Amino acid sequence: MNWSKYSAPQAFYPLAGRLIPWFAVVAVALMGVGLYMGFFVAPTDFQQGESYRIIFVHVPAAWMSMFLYVVMAIWAGVGMGLNARLSFMMAQAIAPTGAMFTFLALLTGAMWGKPTWGAWWVWDARLTSELILLFQYAGVMLLRTSIDDMRRADRSSAVFSLVGVVNVPIIYFSVQWWNTLHQGASVSMSTGSKMAATMLMAMLIMTVAFWLYSIAVVLARVRCIVVERDSLPVWDEKPAVSQEVAEVR
Amino acid sequence: MNRSSMWEAVSGIIKRDLLLAMRRRSDAAMSVFFLVIVASLFPLGVGPEPAVLRTIGPGVLWVAALLACLLSLSRVFTADYVDGALEQMVLVPQPLAVLVAGKVFAHWLISGLPVVLLSPLLGLQFGLDGDPLGVLALSLLLGTPTLSMIGAIGAALVLGVRGSGLLVALLVLPLYVPVLIFGAGAVTGSMAGVGGEANLSLLGASLVLSLFLAPWATAAAIRIALE
């Protein structure tokens, strides 16, 4: 099977349309399972009480915010290397979702920080680097919207995302050495997890759910971008889009 | 193309940019005045207690230096972009990234070096003395070229874009965070008696990394802008 034909937006548009429901359904189902496990099955933390349960949203959101930035930079790099329009569209579609997860991580972090640390916001290493990550997402999106020429907008924001991906780890370590109050990583590759198995399970399920959600949303947004840029909604395999257009007309 | 022709091109660019700056001296003086004014506003806003000023001094001076660099960024490429000289530089046989490094170095000589030389004086205003004053100047000497290098990427990305003045600030300021932390950290460390060597080494590492990577990113951004 010739996969490369899907690098053409025309061919990718219907494929994305067929894939979206699958990712969306599985994402919602896993989110239900993960939240149920997190809120009802996982044991109460002996130190933090019930308030710790926000981590089932907080930690997966924080992971996704960083992961999506890297994925966005990879698509931007692929776009620069292969000069593929669809790659730039993918990068463009990922940015708002990544920014949303960054904001969600900051928001849930603040909600958890108030009862635990006694403050909505502290200048701790992870909070600060997450905040700067949000600024970088904003920079990528603002740079794109400020440039009218689509080709230049694509390539300029690609360069900026690639510069940012070099900078994110540097920012992370610099703020970590600067000041740290956040508890150490709860899950690490070398020592394994320090928490109860059900907690870890719920968190991993939520991560997969957020990941699938991101794919579904990004694919939906790519379809919008394809229609918007090429301004002709005629590639759908079903007459759904053309019908809507006909109704509008 | 041999090495000497590359060096000639770079030194030619540096000489040309310095000459242009000398013909419009007020431009270069502006960012220095800006630094002095911003640094003088803080005591007026915070209050004249020497202990408070000494605590916030390193951070305030570093933030002021960072903003002064930011304001001068539009001068790196804009004039050459408008009159077409930048297009000629892209067509020159020498690699664009090397020419860009020359332009950024000239920019640093014009707007960064005066900040470094003036910083001990401003440090005195904030009650710093002895070792921390020297560390402040040294940290700025290592840090401001990095700021110019990173800033050039942003300046090239926003060439000819509407609202470029604000946009470049939004793009570049988050990237400046590590330099700010290391720079102000070096001065605070030397004031606290633990020494600023670790942070100064990190500033040096940032400088080397940005010297290596930033010219390529800037050159790519210029090519995109000129397409």
Image (cartoon, coloured by chain):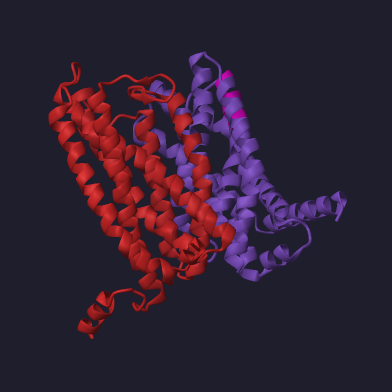
Chain colours: A red, B purple
Of all residues, the one furthest to the bottom in this rendering is: A249
Of all residues, the one furthest to the top in this rendering is: B193
Please indicate whether residue B19 sits to the left or right of residue B70 in the image: right
Q: Is residue A225 visible?
A: no
Tell me where residue A10 sits by quadrant.
bottom left
Please indicate whether residue B133 sits to the left or right of residue A175 in the image: right
Name the quarter where the C terminus of chain B is drawn. bottom right
Tell me if residue B192 comes above or below residue B52 in the rendering: above
State the image coordinates of residue A100 (x, y, percent, origin top left).
30, 48
Front in this rendered view, residue A45 or B68: A45
Tell me if residue A11 comes above or below residue A188 in the rendering: below
State the image coordinates of residue B212 (x, y, percent, origin top left).
66, 42
Magenta stretch secondary structure, dominant: helix
Looking at the image, which residue is at 55% across and 62% down?
A: B159
State the image coordinates of residue A226 (x, y, percent, origin top left).
39, 69
Looking at the image, which residue is at 48% across and 24% down?
A: B127
Looking at the image, which residue is at 30% across and 37% down?
A: A60
Of all residues, the one furthest to the left in this rendering is: A40
Q: Which span is picked out in magenta?
A: B131-139
Looking at the image, which residue is at 64% across and 45% down?
A: B108
Please indicate whether residue A172 sits to the left or right of residue B114 in the image: left
